[in-house]
Image (tube, grey):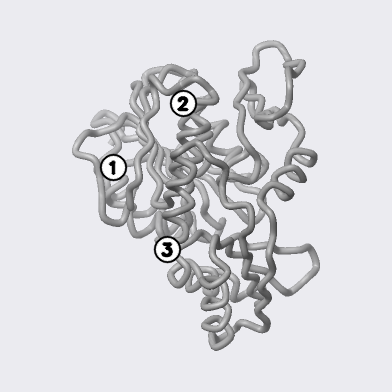
Amino acid sequence: MTAELQSAGQHRRRGLRPTQSWSVVTLVTAHRHADAVARRARAAAGVEPVTILKPRDSRAWIDLYLASARAAARLADEAQRWPWVAAVVVRPYRFSDWQRMLQRECPPLPIGRRWYVVPAERGPVRMPRGRCVLRVVPGTGFGTGHHFTTRFCLERIEEVFDRGGMGRTVLDLGTGSGILAIAAARLGARVVAVDNDPMAVAVAQDHVRLNRVSKYVRVELRDVTQWWPRWKPDVICANLYGPLLLSISEALGRTARRGLILSGLREAEADEVVGPLIRLGWREVVRDGDGEWCGVELRRTTPREK
């Protein structure tokens, strides 16, 4: 992780707002090369890229948000020499302006039968009966419920705990905004939520406090390619991305006791990720997608089912 992002995360832990003036580096490439360019950008910058695709357009735009103009200039200079990158653009933006725009464009969002995701600064809302409010600050971490992968995980968390028999401990890998950990805690689970981005960890901690579930959720800075808990959670929820899920699939299968909720996959990647888990004794029970992204739920096969 870059020093700039570490510094931003430290500011959040002190209760301050993120740096007001940031830089965004945009890499323009062909749709078919977007994943490869995004992986290289992630490795070079140490931050999670945002890939933007438009209907009926063969191009893809990959945005990387950096807290240092110098770091953005270095990345832009390096990226101009990468294969498949057609153009590189660097521009400044103000976090507060972007956040206000997201507040306007992110109305309360019902998800599943239970959840109602509401921007943090919005006042009291008229909530449909039987729903539970999850308050988040749009734009401060991946996971506001507006993307298919987050919605899938929220819906499956609801189903897993509503049907019972799945235990009460959860490990949330790649927690982002912390919304999945908060949802699980609202249903009575004890949760450890981890992310390798200091900014995400700080944001998730803020959201945990905002939603008043600090007693049930612990947020930690961890890299899942190098760390795994010694304890075995009943359920692991991992909203990551396909190649990473594939690389840790055996660790997922050996660590979780009863359930796996996996998302962040492209639909074409699902079989490859699920295969090693089935060989370890897991059974796929739900798969859903939106034509591009995919999520999978698996349960451990009991001896009677084998």
Label 1 vs 2, first from the N-terminus: 2
Which quadrant holds the C terminus? top left
Residue 2 badge? 3
Examine the image and state in which quarter residue 17 appears: top right
Which quadrant holds the N terminus? bottom left
Q: Which residue is situated farthest in the top direction here?
A: 129
Is label 3 in a helix, a strand or a loop? loop
Q: In front: 30, or 20?
A: 20
Which residue lies under the disc numbered 1?
A: 281
CA–CA distance in space, label 3 to label 2: 31 Å
- Please provide percent x and percent y for residue 187: 47, 18
Label 3 vs 2, first from the N-terminus: 3
CA–CA distance in space, label 1 to label 3: 39 Å
Residue 184 badge? 2
Kind of residue at badge 2? Ala
36 in relation to 160, above or below: below
Label 3: few (<14), some (14–19) or many (≥20) C-alpha neighbours in 10 Å: some
Kind of residue at badge 1? Gly
The reply to whether the C-beta atoms of the residues labelled 1 and 2 are less than 8 Å apart is: no
